Image: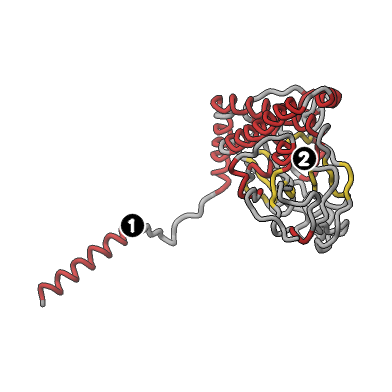
Amino acid sequence: MGLRNFELGWSRYLIMEGMIGFYRFYSSKSKVVDLKKLRPMILKRIEDRAKKYPLMAMVPVAREVLQARSVLYQGVSTLLQRFPVMSCRYCPEVCIGETGHLIRTCGGSRRLRKVNVHEWTKGSLADILVPVETYHLHNMFQKEIKHNERFDYDRVPAVLELCMQAGIHLSDEILYSSSSGLNDVDDAVARAQFASDHDMRLIAIETLKAWERLRCGVEKLLLVYPAKVCKHCSEVHVGPSGHKARLCGVFKYQSWRGTHFWRKAIVDDLVPPKIVWYRRPQDPPILKDEGRNYYGHAPAVVDLCTKAGVIPPAKYHCLMKVEGLSAPV
């Protein structure tokens, strides 16, 4: 028994020695760190980090994003000349078709309960491809934009700002021409006017491919170049840290004095999918409120392309409820 107790005691001693060696104990009499002396070192590290950007390996990805974005806007603008889009007058709801649906999901102009019927008007390109703008920075690692400096910086599309920080040079004509990226509306009208059903299907296929390439490329760029989005509003900032412009909650009670609460941005923040109700072949011509639990959803671009005869990718089938049951009559 004595030998056994000795072995148990020795093993406990070794365990305690290992735990003590694992943790570090600091003296309470240690000197306080002087942040004023560390500030020049921190700023120097920030300057050295800026020299490593842009990464040349990401330049082809940024070029592909710009090309896909141009094809996407041209394709969607052409499809809109053949397949109309309706948008609600009082909320962001969008419906692909000649007439809107009857689903009561409108909260009205005062953001009430979503039990009202939508009041539909003719939609536009911005209803399908939601424009997301951000401040155009002089360089990636510049100082934070103060509230009184918010008018000293231009607002540009967030995707273009991300590509510029990735090393792509864009002319002022492209950067400030329009937030949509569409060069000539008359060209889209002409293409749709003289295009057959087969040609429209080919345009829809290229448009859907451009949509997938755009989102995939933006996702790759966000792995290298940081972007922020506010938790309480849709404000996006492309850069390592958000700006200080107090624009959050301007039309609400300003409990936080309009200061943004930033989090890491994802693809949906820079390229919003704009989810809409998807009408399947087994659904009625006009979607009714009684069958809202049976209907599916789809990104607006995907739904628009399916109207031209394109088969949607398999990853959207679950969201669209392709094989789902129809609403009871």
Residue 133 can be seen in this image:
no
Could you tell which of marks 1 and 2 lies nearer the N-terminus?
A: 1
SS class, disc 1: helix
Q: Residue furthest front?
A: 329
Residue 315, image x and y in percent? 59, 43
CA gap, disc 1 and disc 2: 57 Å
How busy is the neighbourhood of tag 1: few (under 14 within 10 Å), some, or many (20 plus)?
Answer: few
Q: Is residue 223 above or below residue 55?
A: below
Task: Look at label 2 and name its amino acid.
Answer: Ile
Instruction: Residue at 64% x, 25% y: name it.
Output: 63
Instruction: Tell me the residue that label 2 is attached to.
Output: 128
Q: Which mark is residue 294?
A: none
**Within the image, what quadrant is residue 268 found in?**
top right
Residue 217, image x and y in percent? 61, 33
Q: Residue furthest bottom?
A: 1
Q: Nearer the viewer, residue 31 or 319?
A: 319
Task: Look at label 1 and name its amino acid.
Answer: Phe
Residue 314, image x and y in percent? 59, 42
Q: Which is more foreground, mark 1 or mark 2?
A: 2
How busy is the neighbourhood of tag 2: few (under 14 within 10 Å), some, or many (20 plus)?
Answer: many
SS class, disc 2: helix
From the viewer's perspective, tell me whether residue 202 is left or right of residue 149.
left
User: Which quadrant: the C terminus?
Assistant: bottom right
Instruction: Residue at 83% x, 52% y: name it.
Output: 91
User: Which quadrant: the N terminus?
Assistant: bottom left
**Within the image, what quadrant is residue 56 found in?**
top right
Q: Which mark is residue 22?
A: 1
